[in-house]
Amino acid sequence: MIKKKINETNKKERNRSVSIILLLCAAWLVVFFVSFALGRYAVPVPQVIQILFHEMIELIAKVPFLGWLDDLICIPVTWTAKMESVVIMIRLPRILMACLVGGCLAAAGAAYQGVFQNPMASPDILGASNGAAFGAALAILLGSSLSVVTGTAFVMSMLTILIVFLVAHFAPGQKIVNLILAGIMTSSLFSAGTSYIKLVADPDDQLPAITYWMMGSLSGAELSDVAFVIVPMAIGLIPLLLLRWQINLLTLGDEEARALGVNTNVIRLVVIACATLVTAASVSVSGMIGWVGLVIPHLCRKMVGSNYRYLMPASVVCGAVFLLLVDNVSRNLLAVEIPIGILTAFVGAPFFIYLILHKEKYE
């Protein structure tokens, strides 16, 4: 009888969590299409859907043996060339980037909080953000193009994590503690390097560009940027979704996880590496956008609970919705675009204070 009641309770919780995730997906679809209609040049949602569907058919028709689709599916043109240019060349890359960056940062934050069993853990805990900032600042100082700035930020972010892992590996003591301490040390080192670059940068040209990049923004995003980051993001995000069962076991503690036949060291290393990879990819194209990886997992934990089977996908979708909404406010609230990092801080800082004032046992 007791077992039956437990199964019924688990089934209700599972159905509730799945329903919430489906609602989040529906909200993402709505926000995704509405975002195309927002901006200085208005494009009605029906035209947005037609343009996107038309471009999708055109893209599929280029695949060998699928050219007949272009003749079979005929969409009447009810939009202007300017509408198509705005939707495809300007808003599509930015909206896709907001979804990718938001989902990846939220997933990385949830993963770090589970692995380190710390509710304050966030994607920049190992120094990836400061490493990327140093790389971007150095590239801007050398007068590099935007694509080189993005690439240098990604490479320096990965180099930062390599240094952190090497220091943690050779240092005596607990590896998790060593990782955090090495992350703090390396973050401080690269932060000092970035400060020096800002000191010697041209105050009329280079310094404003470095400062604006560090505030976080998706302006100027192009489809080539999406193509650049989507591969490392997929390499990092897919394993996080597949390993969410094992992350549940890591939250129980090493002894309990080993008793269940889980190699905690390997799983922890893989999860940290994947979370760091998506963080590095995100920061390299968006700049330093804070708080998403801290706030969103906690919001999702309130909605679907602490089971990573549901928490991880919920965090990905909710992170995409959140950053998409923030980006819409960023580019439409004022005549001058507000950096996303400023807006996310307005949300994250009060939530951080809430966590401090309501200390509860971390689950």
Image (tube, rainbow, N blue to C red):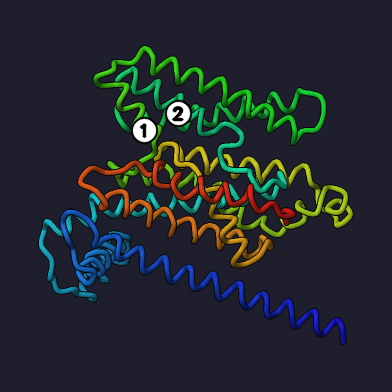
Taking the image as shown, residue 71 lies to the left or right of residue 232, namely left
In the rendered image, the quadrant that contains the N terminus is bottom right
Residue 78: assigned label: none
Front residue (pair 329, 266):
329
Residue found 56% across the figure and 20% down from its top? 189
Task: Measure the alpha-carbon separation of dots 2 and 1.
Answer: 8 Å
Taking the image as shown, residue 144 lies to the left or right of residue 175, namely left
- The vertical placement of 255 against 299, above or below, is above
Q: Position of residue 345 (x, y in %)?
A: 45, 44
Q: Secondary structure at mark 2?
A: helix
Q: Residues within 10 Å of mark 1 (few under 14, many from 20)?
A: many
- Say how many tags the image has: 2
Residue found 55% across the figure and 40% down from its top? 277
Front residue (pair 257, 349):
349
- First in residue order: circle 2 vs circle 1: 2
Q: Residues within 10 Å of mark 2 (few under 14, many from 20)?
A: many
Taking the image as shown, residue 304 lies to the left or right of residue 75, namely right
Asked whether the beta carbons under mark 2 and mark 1 sit within 8 Å of each other, the answer is yes
Residue found 30% across the figure and 65% down from its top? 34
Q: Which residue was labeled with disc 1?
A: 213
Q: Amino acid at mark 2?
A: Ala
Q: Which residue was labeled with disc 2?
A: 133
